[in-house]
Image: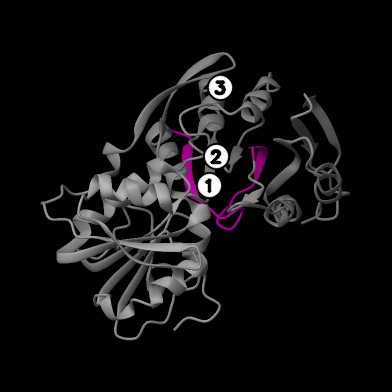
């Protein structure tokens, strides 16, 4: 059994005797459980989780198109995601990956929406039934009876037209991507402050579906832009919109973990939540590490909720800060890299 397990994992372990030999946990980002006698994989859409767990060698799969995914599983356990649309995508991925007679399980807590998730499961597979419940969690089971078509990422990529300052961009959306299918207000305010061509090369950090990078390339086609994000959905959307363009690269990176070049300008609408909790540790780590990837005099333009205490760490680690826009909800910062900051000489 797994120690210090989540309620959902604890509930699963009450039914270990029903698990098949080949098992995949979809959306489980915690430590891999120790279940003897099973060939265990876990699919994550978080590059940092995949990387820190040893990647493919650790039994982790990154995203719904990882080439290392086995051909079939006996049991696939789907953990409840936030979005209804992402649950639909997880179920669509899982069903054709089951071996004949294999079982698809759905597990989640009441606060995670397992009630509506179970209804969604029953709509897709009418024979689905509840296997167990405890600790405000439920475990459901479905056995797909019909032949299910294989999962193709391309069929889930939704073309979207996004109205941005000075341009309507042709982008893509996937279930679970940030600001799915629309331009969030913070990013809009950031773009409204960019009136001159940024210094080359530029980095779009935490790029989401690629809207900032695409906007920069629309206005200054020759600008070299790297787009980086930790989430599989964001990377696939950005790749669909921009891959193939000369001077554009899309890279997976947990914050700055896989950034290797130096940049003259950086743009970002960084996240400050981890799951459902506010967590400023990752963004403060970005600030403390960013100087190593900046050219002298580089500018960082970022937007954040106005209540977040970013000005002091930005000044400490990077350099002088100006506020370009503040409507009480969002604040756009411009930071100039200085050799006098704490890490400026790196």
Residue 249 in the magenta stretch? The answer is: yes
Question: Is label 3 or label 1 in front?
Answer: 1
Q: Which residue is mark 3?
A: 220
Extent of the magenta region: 245-269
Report the quarter where the N terminus lies: bottom left
Label 3 residue SS: loop
Q: Which residue is mark 1?
A: 229
**Residue at the (71%, 57%) spot, across then down:** 281
Report the quarter where the C terminus lies: bottom right
Label 2 residue SS: loop
Q: Is any part of residue 299 visible from this angle?
A: yes
Q: Is residue 141 above or below residue 329?
A: below
**Residue at the (24%, 66%) spot, across then down:** 70
Circle 3 residues within 10 Å: few <14, some 14–19, many ≥20: few
User: Residue 3 appears at what percent x and percent y?
Assistant: 52, 81
Q: Quadrant of residue 44?
A: bottom left
User: Residue 148 appears at what percent x and percent y?
Assistant: 15, 50
Q: Nearer the viewer, residue 204 or 284?
A: 284
Q: Is any part of residue 89 visible from this angle?
A: no
Q: CA distance from mark 2 to mark 1?
A: 6 Å
> Does 246 sit left or right of 103 as displayed?
right
Q: CA distance from mark 3 to mark 2?
A: 18 Å
> Does 194 sit left or right of 30 as displayed?
right
Question: Is label 3 or label 2 in front?
Answer: 2
User: Residue 7 appears at what percent x and percent y?
Assistant: 50, 69
Q: Nearer the viewer, residue 141 or 230?
A: 141
Q: Which residue is mark 2?
A: 207
**Residue at the (56%, 55%) spot, across then down:** 254
- First of labels 2, 1 by sequence position: 2
Contact (CB < 8 A) between labels 2 and 1?
Answer: yes
């Amino acid at each position: 059994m797994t120690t210090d397990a989540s309620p959902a994992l604890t509930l699963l372990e009450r039914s270990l005797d029903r698990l098949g030999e080949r098992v995949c946990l979809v959306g489980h980002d915690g430590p891999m459980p120790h279940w003897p006698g099973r060939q265990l994989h876990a699919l994550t859409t978080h590059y940092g989780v995949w990387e820190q767990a040893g990647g493919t060698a650790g039994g982790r799969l990154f995203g719904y198109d990882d080439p290392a995914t086995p051909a079939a599983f006996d049991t696939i356990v789907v953990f409840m995601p936030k979005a209804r649309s992402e649950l639909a995508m997880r179920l669509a991925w899982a069903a054709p990956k089951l071996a004949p007679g294999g079982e698809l399980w759905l597990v989640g807590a009441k606060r995670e929406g397992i009630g509506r998730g179970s209804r969604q499961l029953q709509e897709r597979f009418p024979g689905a039934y509840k296997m167990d419940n405890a600790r405000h969690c439920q475990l459901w089971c479905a056995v797909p009876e019909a032949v299910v078509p294989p999962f193709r990422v391309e069929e889930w990529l939704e073309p979207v037209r996004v109205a941005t300052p000075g341009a309507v961009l042709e982008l893509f959306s996937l279930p679970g991507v940030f600001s799915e299918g629309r331009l969030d207000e913070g990013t809009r305010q950031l773009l409204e402050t960019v009136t001159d061509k940024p210094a080359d090369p530029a980095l779009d950090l935490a790029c989401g579906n690629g809207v900032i990078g695409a906007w920069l390339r629309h206005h200054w086609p020759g600008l070299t832009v790297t787009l980086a994000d930790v989430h599989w959905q964001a990377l696939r959307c950005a790749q669909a919109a921009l891959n193939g363009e000369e001077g554009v690269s899309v890279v997976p990176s947990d914050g700055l973990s896989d950034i290797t070049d130096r940049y003259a300008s950086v743009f970002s609408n960084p996240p400050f939540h981890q799951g459902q909790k506010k967590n400023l540790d990752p963004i403060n780590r970005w600030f403390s590490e960013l100087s190593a990837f900046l050219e002298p005099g580089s500018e960082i333009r970022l937007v954040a909720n106005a209540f977040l205490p970013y000005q002091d760490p930005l000044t400490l680690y990077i350099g002088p800060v100006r506020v370009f826009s503040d409507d009480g909800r969002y604040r756009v910062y411009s930071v100039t890299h200085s050799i006098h900051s704490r890490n400026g000489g790196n």
